[in-house]
Image (tube, helix red, strand yellow):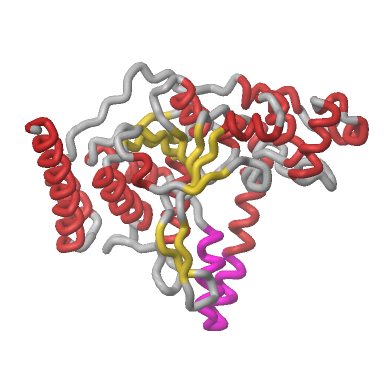
Amino acid sequence: MGLNLKALVVREKTSLEAFASKIVAVDAYNAIYQFLAIIRGPDGLHLSDNQGRVTSHLSGLFYRNIRFLSIGIKPVYVFDGKPPSLKSAEIEHRKQAKRDATVKYEKALKAGDMQEARKFAQQTTSMRDSMVKDSKKILELFGIPVIQAPSEGEATAAHLTQTGQAYASASQDFDSVLFGAKKLVRNFSNSGRRKIPNRNSYIEIEPEIIDTQKTLSELKLNKEQMIDLGILIGTDFNPDGFERVGPKTALKMIRAHSRLEDIPQIQEQLEKIDYNQIRKIFLEPEVSKVAEINFGQIDYEGITKYLVEDRNFSQDRVQTSLNRLKKAFEKKSHTLEQWMGD
């Protein structure tokens, strides 16, 4: 479900170019889910190799990181570990939603309605261990650091911004704000031209950046109050939130009463959730302590071998993209030499 803070946070349009030379901690599962949902064939099915293994995630990671590195962005991918036990209700809810979408997909396919079939197919997206392994392999071939979080990837990504090791955290989920990310960038992995479902038209999806301190100042809240506001709306750890409480009502309640325990009209519902434990997940999250982030060399030959020989990607497309990346690096190097020469 994700936390619905869209109406409250201070969002500013930006561009991928604005992150040139900056380290961005990417919520890996979030990015890979986007690739698995978006990159599909006309029938709504994932792209796959000649052994039937899904390759949509590899395609997304390959082309998107070519773009990142060509611009000069330094991505670091943070993978989820074991979810907190309080997330079990949300995980079950997501599984049920995927089962329901699978039934609707099959019905639409049977009726020959390919647009509906594709829409529901996207909602069936799930990640398997093999996909995580594939993703880590392609990233390592690119020399891109991979960090394994002990629990929520967003928490470790946010921690990297707090220690100054990353400029921003990249995710579609607003939970990063509650985890304390100094800056959150959305639409980082899916920016670009996208077709509008069921219409023959396109929109340009632009990255947007959220400065957590600006948001707190604008809302006149501190970090603890922001977390309580999130709990009122509904987080992954209490997905239903509170009855008849949306973002604006939640903000009014917190401004008026400061904390959950002091809001009179929610006390009966409050007794049913472990709100102190949810607070602790956000205030004292389990995170990976990273001493240093090191970027490796790009293994052009290894990428080509893996994608073309092992996973049946088009050699021409892979080679063309890698050549474009090499040229981008050469241009930067040449510009730097000219500047130093001057």
Question: Going by the picture, which residue comes out furthest to the bottom?
Answer: 112
Camera-side residue: 307 or 30?
30
The picture places residue 217, in percent across and down from the top left corner, at: 65, 30
Which secondary structure is most common in the magenta stretch?
helix
Residue at position x 63%, y 25% in the image: 281
Above-or-below relation of 328 to 98: above
Among the 4 quarters of the image, the one containing residue 51: bottom left
Is 188 a magenta residue?
no
Query: Visible in this render: residue 321?
Result: yes
- Horizontally, residue 241 falls left or right of residue 184, namely right
Residue at position x 84%, y 45% in the image: 243
Camera-side residue: 92 or 156?
156
Above-or-below relation of 102 to 291: below
Is 121 a magenta residue?
yes
The picture places residue 317, in percent across and down from the top left corner, at: 20, 62
Residue at position x 68%, y 41% in the image: 89
Residue at position x 51%, y 69% in the image: 196
Q: Which residues are magenta?
A: 102-124
The picture places residue 254, in percent across and down from the top left corner, at: 79, 31
Question: Going by the picture, which residue comes out furthest to the front?
Answer: 342
- Horizontally, residue 218 falls left or right of residue 317, namely right
The picture places residue 85, in percent across and down from the top left corner, at: 64, 31
Query: Visible in this render: residue 90?
Result: no
Q: Quadrant of the C terminus?
A: top left
- Horizontally, residue 145 falls left or right of residue 33, namely left
Camera-side residue: 32 or 214?
214
